[in-house]
């Protein structure tokens, strides 16, 4: 957390703390009186007695800045609190209740936001006078519409989340949901906006003071000090520069703190972004040989630095893949399948550290910068994601989305790209592709949407197609069509396919090779038919026993794998599967088994299942049945 916030954040917090401290203790600090004229020679520069010099009336500039901080910060804090106290409940109400409450609140809010701020300030000062309280009220009220918008937006984004729905299903009262589920989540962006809001108010107060609409002399305010010093710019520039600089630093600090707090709660900053190798300490790469193969992964690792410790999501995965072959990656949820794919593609969350090497036809992809990777992603590596609805932009037509990679990567003109898009859509079995080009994703069925994403992934003719659970979001009949299509396209285009799936019947049917992952490591690897017919690692055996088989004539009982996958932050010293393994012995707790091949395919187990299949329940998982 400390590292993520950065040194700038802590310097900003320190500065704000210092200004607050000085403002609060202004009366007891050993400073000259802020209104004492001729405390020193007028317009004199910095000296020991007056560290920031004196102004045109010989008043101590430092003392005036410190006392001015009281007004500027006081107005900042007060106005933000006022805006928050009025705006937040309205925002929550609009976002949670929606319908009439939302319409009315937002309509009034829009009108309030459109009202000219300066006219409002002038009107209040003209009628009620330029006092600290009135300035605070003016700036607080002016901030309310922004608070309503912010809090409404945050409430809307949380109101439909699964945890709120779960609370509703349990019959929880609205008030309780608001306090327990919504308010704690909304308070994070609110805190960040409060700091940014304070910066805005400090500047606004300065501007009002500059116009003579804020607290009147002799009470100093930062804006007022700048206004006074303006006339001495040529003879005594320090009089205007000192308060300007203090105000600048304070506003900058508020913005910085607010921005860092926002980034902590911003999901976009934990989303996909190219691996930032320079900013993170890379993991060491062991010696290895670069092979003459299409795709090679060598000791690939993906670790996350989290407040709890290092999550080893992928830990030393190696494999090779040839053209015309399908490699399946299987394992339970959280075993590292998706992170393995993302590590290959170089698209990882910002907190990830990648290690190891990836070679595409001998070309080291891990040595490429994110910008250089862009020429590989699409043209050489294509990806099909799990949920086509989220993979497609809902507000753009299929035509604009399918033609985009053709125009960007292949430099096609509008007409040519359209013709190619029609050909691509037809090749993935979309009937009437011309009509589909003008449609939006929501106007297509799930199966059609997935065909569109496959067409997009294939548009630049990739060498390797990654399909991360491509059929999970589809119903069973469509699943088979999509997998058949992927297989057919692989044959036609002589590509390689990396298929991530937790469905072993899918893998057994369509994959040539398989790697079984457990807790970020490969625990078994080999030809799919062989691994499924004769699994050596008890985990693979357990996965098979837990997998339903539609072709099974007799409905045999599925065996659940007992226990839970281990905590990736705190992996045991020995075999990670030990607590769940029925065959574990003393050695398994002492030493982690390496991935070795004893005359067959490689597996990581000290006490493997027998290779002739006599001691287990493996009922001929069908392979090659395509
Ligand atoms: N941003 C992150 N920060 C910390 N840990 C993460 C992050 N993203 C993923 N992980 C962890 O990495 C591990 C592997 O995640 P991954 O998504 O690769 O699993 P998976 O096998 O694909 O699971 P699933 O089948 O559910 O998609 C998980 O334990 C997950 O909690």
Image: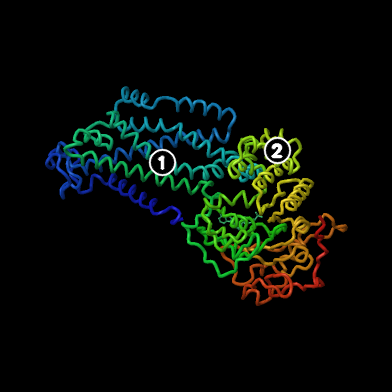
Residue 592 horizontal/vertical position (percent): 62, 72
Q: Quadrant of residue 32?
A: top left
**Mark 1 / mark 2, whichever is N-terminal:** 1
Residue 302 vs residue 532: left or right?
A: left
Ligand 1 picture quarter: bottom right
What residue did someone put label 1 on?
A: 196
What residue lies at 65% left-to-right and 73% top-to-bottom?
A: 593
Q: Is residue 425 above or below residue 483?
A: above
What residue did someone put label 2 on?
A: 422
Of the pair 167 and 380, the residue shown nearer to us: 380
Of the pair 156 and 481, the residue shown nearer to us: 481
Residue 343 vs residue 386: left or right?
A: left
Q: Is residue 87 above or below residue 606?
A: above
Q: Quadrant of residue 455?
A: top right
Residue 338 horizontal/vertical position (percent): 63, 55
Cα separation between marks 1 and 2: 49 Å
Residue 435 horizontal/vertical position (percent): 71, 33
Task: Judge whether residue 171 can be spotted in this image.
Answer: no
């Amino acid at each position: 957390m400390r590292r993520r916030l950065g040194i700038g954040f802590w310097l900003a917090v320190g500065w704000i703390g210092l200004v607050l401290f000085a403002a609060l203790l202004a009366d007891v600090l050993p400073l000259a009186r802020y209104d004492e004229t001729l405390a020193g020679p007028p317009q004199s520069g910095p000296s020991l007695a007056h560290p920031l010099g004196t102004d045109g009336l010989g008043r101590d500039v430092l003392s005036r800045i410190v006392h001015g901080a009281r007004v500027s910060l006081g107005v900042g804090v007060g106005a933000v609190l006022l805006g928050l106290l009025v705006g937040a409940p309205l925002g929550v109400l609009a976002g949670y209740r929606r319908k009439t409450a939302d319409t009315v609140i937002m309509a009034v809010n829009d009108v309030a936001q459109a009202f000219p701020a300066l006219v409002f300030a002038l009107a209040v000062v003209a009628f009620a006078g330029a006092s600290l309280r009135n300035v605070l009220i003016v700036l607080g009220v002016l901030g309310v519409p922004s608070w309503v918008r912010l809090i409404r937006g945050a409430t809307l984004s949380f109101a439909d989340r699964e945890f709120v729905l779960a609370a509703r299903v349990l019959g929880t009262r609205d008030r309780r949901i608001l306090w327990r589920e919504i308010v704690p989540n909304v308070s994070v962006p609110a805190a960040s906006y409060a700091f940014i809001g304070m910066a805005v108010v400090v500047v606004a107060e300065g501007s009002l003071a500059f116009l003579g609409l804020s607290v009147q002399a002799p009470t100093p305010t930062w804006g007022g000090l700048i206004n006074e010093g303006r006339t001495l710019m040529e003879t005594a520039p320090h009089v205007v520069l000192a308060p300007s600089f203090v105000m600048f630093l304070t506003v900058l600090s508020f913005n910085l703190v607010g921005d860092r707090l926002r980034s902590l709660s911003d999901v976009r900053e934990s989303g996909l972004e190219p691996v930032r190798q320079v900013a993170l300490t890379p993991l060491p790469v062991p010696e290895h040989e670069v092979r003459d193969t299409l795709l090679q992964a060598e000791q690939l690792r993906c670790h996350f630095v989290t407040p709890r410790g290092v999550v080893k999501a992928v830990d030393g995965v190696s494999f090779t893949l040839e053209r015309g072959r399908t490699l399946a990656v299987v394992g339970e949820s959280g075993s590292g399948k998706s992170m393995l794919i993302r590590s290959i593609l170089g698209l990882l969350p910002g907190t990830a550290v990648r290690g190891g090497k990836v070679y595409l036809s001998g070309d080291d992809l891990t040595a490429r910068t994110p910008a250089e990777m862009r020429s590989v992603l699409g043209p050489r590596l294509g990806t099909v994601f799990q949920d086509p609805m989220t993979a497609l932009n809902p507000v753009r037509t299929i035509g604009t989305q399918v033609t985009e990679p053709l125009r960007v990567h292949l430099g096609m003109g509008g007409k040519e790209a359209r013709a190619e898009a029609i050909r691509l859509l037809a090749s993935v079995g979309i009937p009437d592709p011309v009509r589909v080009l003008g449609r939006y994703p929501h106007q297509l069925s799930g199966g059609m949407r997935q065909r569109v994403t496959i067409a997009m992934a294939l548009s630049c003719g990739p060498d390797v197609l990654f399909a991360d659970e491509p059929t999970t979001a589809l119903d069973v009949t469509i699943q088979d069509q999509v997998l058949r299509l992927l297989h057919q396209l692989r044959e036609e285009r002589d590509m390689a396919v990396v298929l991530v799936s937790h469905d072993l019947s899918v893998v057994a049917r369509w994959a040539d090779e398989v790697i079984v992952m457990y807790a970020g490591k490969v625990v078994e690897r080999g030809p799919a038919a062989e691994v499924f017919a004769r699994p050596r690692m008890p985990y693979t055996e357990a996965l098979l026993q837990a997998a339903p088989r539609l072709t099974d004539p007799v409905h045999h009982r599925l065996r659940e794998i007992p226990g839970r996958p281990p905590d990736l932050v705190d992996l045991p010293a020995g075999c990670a599967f030990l607590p769940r393994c029925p065959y574990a012995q003393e050695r398994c707790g002492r030493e982690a088994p390496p991935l070795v091949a004893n005359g067959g395919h490689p597996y990581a187990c000290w006490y493997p299942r027998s290779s002739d299949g006599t001691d287990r329940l493996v009922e001929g998982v069908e392979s090659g049945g395509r």
